[in-house]
Image (cartoon, rainbow, N blue to C red):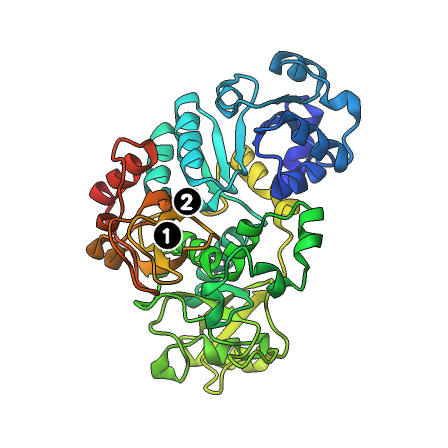
Amino acid sequence: MNLHAMLLERQAAARPLRVGLIGAGKFGSMYLSQALRTPGIHVVGVADLSVARARKALRLVGWPAERIAAKSFEAAAAKGSTHLLEDAMALIASPHLDIVIDATGHPASGIRHVLACCMHGKHIVMVNVEADALAGPLLAERAAQAGIVYSLAYGDQPALICEMVDWARAAGFAVVAAGKGTKYLPAYHKSTPDTVWEHYGISPEDAKIGAMNAKMFNSFVDGTKSAIEMAAVANATGLVPAPGGLAFPPCGIDDLAHVLRPIAAGGQLHHHGQVEVISSVERDARAVPRDLRFGMFVTIEGESDYVRRCFREYGVTTDDSGRYSAMYKPFHLIGLELGISVASAGLRREPTGVASGWRGDVVATAKRKLAAGEVLDGEGGYLVYGRLMPAADSLAAGALPLGLAHELALRRAVDAGEVLRWSDVKVDERDDAVAFRRLMERTVAI
């Protein structure tokens, strides 16, 4: 609880944390809005495929024009301003920054960025949870070997869930389950970019005017984003997915301790120590009272009579046995909170969540019957969604990771709901991301 004081010390000593951002989309823009107001932080560079878009994002969140006029990293470092460029690798290689933020959401690019940070000695904060779900355990190993911090992004739900799990364990509680809320119905797995806006109550015309990315928004609806985020949590915390993946039980905050306990104790968990996502609607689409759609939770166990008595004495909400309770946060502030990861990595050399093993995987699953020769279109697209599986089950099945299910042609027809396998697609084993994932499958213990 002293990050702000440490940042003030850096500012007073004229030694700010020097930050480079890759990707000036919504998440990156939200961070930039707060970096401008945070002591001890200097955003030295912003890399985006469109410099014009990056400049527009900076102006949108309030950066003065003179702060974004630097023509080089050297000029930015000397004048306290920001250099804009297209080349992410050039940003990572610059000697004028200490910490890189990957806010791209592109799995293959994320792998390249992390490996480059290892080479150049830069800490990296991964907003790019897609890359973490694809290869986070091996990326974390490489970062540790290079002596850099590899961190999940605070403000995004996985890092906040990791924080809650750490709080519970550091206080001596056994963690029964942890996860997040969302709006879920089984039919959503079939959602496509053509149908996504009806789930948000937005017209396609308004979405187009707002430059809203249909595939990105659809990944939240069809269950893919939930699977990706819970894989990251499982790999960081040691909690394990259920064999069938996410069940999305309907649950409000008053029922967390009842629902998120093992089946043997009257709840809906497959096992003690599980990741799960709860739904804000019942299966008939009725709203769940006091839902946690935008929040996170952890359920804990009072393992002694004394602790359970303390629960009663202090008005803690529990299940009917008095044994299980829960803590929750009702919302997250996304990129507005990202500075916590930047400060933690730069000042304490601590990640706000990092893979410690390979426990969860996200596999490509057919949304409809697919024909041989069809080309997969990746996360949030028309053909596949991401399903969470225990990593051991995914590896045993030879399942195709969702993060690589893009621009690959099918070798055979696949039934709706079927998990795709490596053998079902034509893969270029020489591709860097494919090779790195294959290496993880051979070398990282499960």
Residue pictured at 33% horizontal, 82% vertical: 264
Q: Nearer the viewer, mark 2 or mark 1?
A: 2
Q: Which residue is labeled 1 in the image?
A: 235
Where residue 165 sits in the image (x, y, percent)? 47, 59
Q: Amino acid at mark 2?
A: Asp
Instruction: Say left or right for 306 vs 414.
Output: right
Q: Residue 55 in the image: x percent, y percent?
A: 70, 28
Q: Residue at x 71, y 15 (%)?
A: 79
Q: Whole-percent x and y of residue 204?
A: 65, 55
Q: Residues within 10 Å of mark 1 (few under 14, many from 20)?
A: many
Question: Residue 132 got which mark?
Answer: 2
Q: Nearer the viewer, residue 342 or 112?
A: 112
Identify the amino acid type marked 1.
Asn
Please report whichever mark, 2 or 1, sits nearer to the chain's N-terminal start: 2
**Cβ–Cβ under 8 Å for marks 2 and 1:** yes
Q: 26 or 79: which is nearer to us?
A: 26
Q: Nearer the viewer, residue 412 or 170?
A: 412
Give the answer, above or below, for where 295 lies relative to 280.
above
- Mark 2 and mark 1: span between their CA atoms? 9 Å
Query: For this view, does 286 lie left or right of residue 424?
Result: right
Please tell me whether mark 2 sits on a helix, a strand or a loop: helix
Residue 74 visible somewhere in the drawing:
yes
- The image's mark for residue 424 is none
At 60% across and 62% down in the image, what residue appears? 294
Residue occupying the point 57% across, 34% down: 23
Q: Is residue 113 above or below residue 3?
A: above
Asked which quadrant contains residue 371, the reply is bottom left
Residue placed furthest toward the bottom: 320
| Residue 302 located left or right of residue 417 | right
* Residue 121 % position (x, y): 44, 24
**Residue 355 seen by the camera:** no
